[in-house]
Image (cartoon, rainbow, N blue to C red):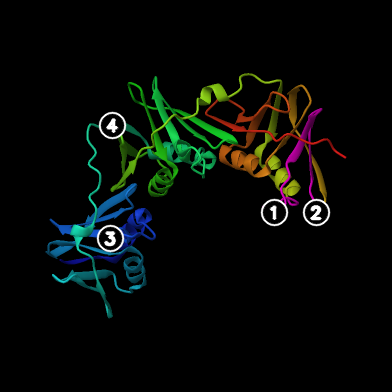
Amino acid sequence: MHIICEKQPLSEAVANVSRAVSGKNTLAALEGILLQAKNGRLSLTGYDLELAITTSIEAKVLDEGEIVLSARLFLDMIRRMQSETVNISSDEKMLTVIKGGATEYTILGIPASDYPELPSVSQTVPVQMSQGVLKNMIGQTLFAVATTDGKPVHTGSLFEIKDGQLNVVSVDGYRLALRKEKIAFDGEITFIVPAKSLSEVSKLIKDEDEQISLEVARRHIIFQAGGYSVISRLLEGEFLDYKAAIPSGGKTTIQIGTRELIAAIERSSLLISDNIKSPLRLYFEENMIRISCSTAIGKSYDEIPCSQKGEDVEIGFNSRYMLDALKASECDQVQLVLNGPLSPIKVMPTDGDAFTFLVLPVRLKSEQ
């Protein structure tokens, strides 16, 4: 193989496909990027047996061929080159020379035949939507995905399309995030995408109206946007009945500035750490939120005004979980809906129901 290509698009492509490369693996090829030069294009693939990212860039192909190079080393080499073009050549013994101006590296590659085949995805259902909308939906739900695999199906987000509406749902046993959006799709389809795959898709797509294509099959999904294809396996299993988990109605409704509430919770959480855990205590009373916390270090107290309808209520919760939900809301004002001290706090927009976040309460001990 022998190619010459521009450094900037090559560096960007290598960095992006590297996200799907396995960090440490018994199969050395999986720690590398598959390079394939053919018909004036250089194709690049990263794959960890669960997630694959592929793309191609223009290249002057002097000799067609394919090889696997160490992802980390290859990226570091290209990024440090001062030239605007990169010359890559490899011989039949896999000895690869990477040149850029006066800089030259010689490394040993791995035969492309050692690289595992990507899954063949057939009989797909096509779904089209705005890149910006999908990026926003992922951003507003990913925080609530389970990080432990007590129930592996909850380490991903549920995608549910019905009656022209896409619902994306994440749960982790302590909180729930639901995001709704109208999309142009006739029919019904449900699938669960691993959190890692969604995180990588979100990094690749832009916050704009350009379309992204989702090709959904029984076991895999392909996201296609901006010249990249992301192939991910889908998770199988029984996802939580999220509709039954969301309480209807509410005895107390609070409207509050999001930034003000975030700042007050952060101030009151200074006495809490990974080693010193304690719930925050919120008392909603007479258009005022009184926030207190007591740990082995000491006590904190704060209060901020709010707009309250309904009963006074006192409730405790994990401060980090509440902060995650408030920050994901991306609203100037939010609505908190409560059904008593032992029912989940519902965080919603002040108008409509584009998102619903649930944070489970913590049972409070009586103050000394």
Q: Is residue 61 found left or right of 203 in the rendered image?
A: left
Residue 126 bears which disc, if any? Answer: 4
Q: Position of residue 50 (x, y in %)?
A: 34, 47
Residue type pointed to by label 3: Ala
Magenta stretch: give its range.
270-297
Badge nearest the viewer, 3 or 4: 3
Q: Residues within 10 Å of mark 3 (few under 14, many from 20)?
A: many
Q: Position of residue 234 (x, y in %)?
A: 36, 38
Q: Residue at x 81, y 29 (%)?
A: 285
Q: Earlier in the sequence, mark 4 or mark 1?
A: 4
- Determine if the magenta segment contains residue 278: yes
Q: Is residue 58 found left or right of 152 in the rendered image?
A: left
Q: CA distance from mark 2 to mark 3?
A: 51 Å
**In this picture, is 296 found above or below 26?**
above
Residue of label 1: 275
Residue type pointed to by label 1: Asn
Q: CA distance from mark 3 to mark 4?
A: 32 Å
Residue of label 3: 29
Q: Quadrant of the C terminus?
A: top right
Q: Earlier in the sequence, mark 1 or mark 3?
A: 3
Q: Is residue 1 found left or right of 232 in the rendered image?
A: left
Q: Nearer the viewer, residue 39 or 31?
A: 31
Q: CA distance from mark 2 to mark 1?
A: 11 Å
